[in-house]
Image: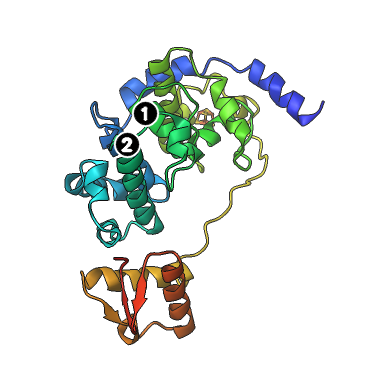
C-alpha cells in the first residue's frame, strides 16, 4: 500500500488520545507562567519567541524581566533594537530579540498595538513561523488549530504511528494532530498543550516513562514491543569552539559596554581564532545585531 494511503488509514483509525490526555494534563501540567489565566497574547508571543531555542527553566526569569520592562508591544516598539538585544542577554540566538522588536513595531503600526488573532496576520509579522502563529492563536485566543512542536511529534510518532522517533517535520504532523483534536475549542487547546507536556515530561526522547503515561494502553509503539524504527533526529552542532560561541562572546562584549561603542581591536582580542572572531563580527553586522562605525562596534541604534 502506498505510504500516503497507509498514513490516511492510520489517521482514520486513530484511537481516542484526547480524553486521557486532558485528564492527565489537568492534574500533571507544570505551573508555567504562560499557562496562568490572563497571561495575555503579548506574553504568549514573547514566551514563544524565547522558547523557540531555549529551555523552559532558562526562559522563565528572562520572560518575567522582559514583560516587566515592556508589558505591551507598544512599550517594546518605543525602545531601541539595542535595548532589546541587551535585555535578551544570554538567551542565545539573539536575532530573536531583533525580530521580536520588529514584530512589536509592526503590531503597533499595523494592529493598533494589539497582537493579532488571525494566523495569517500573525504569520505576516517578523520572526513568526507557523508554530508560533498557531500557538498564539490557540493558547492566547483559544482558537482551534493544531499546534505541533518537537515533543508533540514524538508523542504522535509513538502513540499513533508506532515509531520510536518522528521523521522530519512536515505538514502531515498538523493533520495527525488535527485527527485527535476534539471539536470544542477550549478542549482542543488543552489537548494541544497536553500532548506537548506529555512529550516534554513523560514521553521523552530517551527512556520514556510509559509506566505513568496516560496513553500506555493505546500506544502503538508500546503495543508493538518498542521496535527500533531508526532515530531520525538531527544532532545539534557542538557549541564549544563554534562560530555561534564566537558570536555570543562578541555580543556579550557589546552588551557589557552598555550604550558605548567598543573599539574593534578591543572586541574579544584574546579569542583563540582571530579569523573566527572577525567572521563572527561580520555576521553580526550582516544580521543587523551590531553596527561598525569608524573602527568602533556597537549594538544597533
Ligand atoms: S506509552 Fe510510552 S512510548 Fe507510548 S506515548 Fe506513552 S510514554 Fe510515549
| Nearest to the observer: residue 189 or residue 6 | 189
> Furthest residue to the top?
184
Q: Residue at x 32, y 51 (%)?
A: 101
Question: For this view, does 242 lie left or right of residue 89?
Answer: right
On screen, residue 154 versus residue 272, left or right, reads right
Number of residues whose C-alpha sits closer than 10 Å to that of mark 1, classed few (under 14), some (14–19) or many (20 or more): many
Mark 2 near mark 1, Cβ–Cβ under 8 Å? yes
Percent of width and height locating residue 13: 65, 15
Q: Is residue 254 shown above or below 108?
A: below
Query: Is 247 positioned to the left or the right of 228 in the image?
Result: left
Q: Which residue is mark 2?
A: 44
Q: Which mark is residue 139?
A: 1
Mark 2 and ligand 1: say if the CB distance to the nearest ligand atom is below 8 Å: no
Quadrant position of residue 173? top right
Quarter of the rendering occupied by the C terminus: bottom left
Q: Nearer the viewer, residue 299 or 184?
A: 299
As helix, strand or loop, the secondary structure at mark 1 comes to helix
How much space separates mark 2 and mark 1, taking CA atoms?
A: 7 Å
Q: Position of residue 213 (x, y in %)?
A: 45, 26
Kindly tell me whether residue 159 is visible in this rendering.
Answer: no
Amino acid at each position: 500500500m502506498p505510504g500516503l494511503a497507509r498514513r490516511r488509514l492510520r489517521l482514520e483509525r486513530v484511537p481516542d488520545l484526547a480524553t486521557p490526555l486532558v485528564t492527565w494534563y489537568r492534574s500533571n501540567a507544570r505551573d508555567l507562567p504562560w499557562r496562568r489565566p490572563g497571561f495575555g497574547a503579548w506574553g504568549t508571543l514573547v514566551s514563544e519567541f524565547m522558547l523557540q531555542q531555549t529551555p523552559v527553566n532558562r526562559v522563565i526569569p528572562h520572560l518575567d524581566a522582559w514583560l516587566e520592562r515592556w508589558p505591551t508591544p507598544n512599550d517594546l516598539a518605543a525602545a531601541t533594537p539595542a535595548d532589546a538585544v541587551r535585555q535578551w542577554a544570554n538567551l542565545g540566538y539573539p536575532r530573536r530579540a531583533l525580530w521580536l522588536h520588529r514584530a512589536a513595531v509592526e503590531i503597533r503600526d499595523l494592529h493598533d498595538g494589539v497582537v493579532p488573532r488571525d494566523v495569517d496576520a500573525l504569520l505576516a509579522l517578523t520572526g513568526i513561523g507557523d508554530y508560533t502563529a498557531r500557538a498564539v492563536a490557540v493558547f492566547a485566543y483559544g482558537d482551534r488549530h493544531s499546534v505541533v512542536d518537537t515533543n508533540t511529534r514524538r508523542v504522535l510518532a509513538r502513540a499513533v504511528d508506532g515509531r520510536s522517533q518522528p521523521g522530519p517535520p512536515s505538514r502531515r504532523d498538523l493533520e495527525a494532530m488535527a485527527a485527535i483534536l476534539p471539536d470544542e475549542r477550549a478542549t482542543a487547546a488543552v489537548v494541544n498543550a497536553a500532548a506537548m507536556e506529555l512529550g516534554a515530561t513523560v514521553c521523552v526522547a530517551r527512556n520514556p516513562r510509559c509506566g505513568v503515561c496516560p496513553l500506555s494502553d493505546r500506544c502503538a509503539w508500546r503495543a508493538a514491543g518498542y521496535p527500533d524504527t531508526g532515530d531520525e533526529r538531527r544532532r545539534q552542532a557542538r557549541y564549544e569552539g563554534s562560530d555561534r560561541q564566537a558570536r555570543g562572546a562578541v555580543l556579550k562584549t557589546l552588551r557589557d559596554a552598555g550604550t558605548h561603542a567598543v573599539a574593534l581591536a578591543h572586541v574579544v582580542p584574546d579569542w583563540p581564532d582571530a579569523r573566527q572572531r572577525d567572521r563572527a563580527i561580520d555576521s553580526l553586522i550582516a544580521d543587523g545585531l551590531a553596527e561598525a562605525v569608524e573602527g568602533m562596534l556597537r549594538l544597533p541604534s
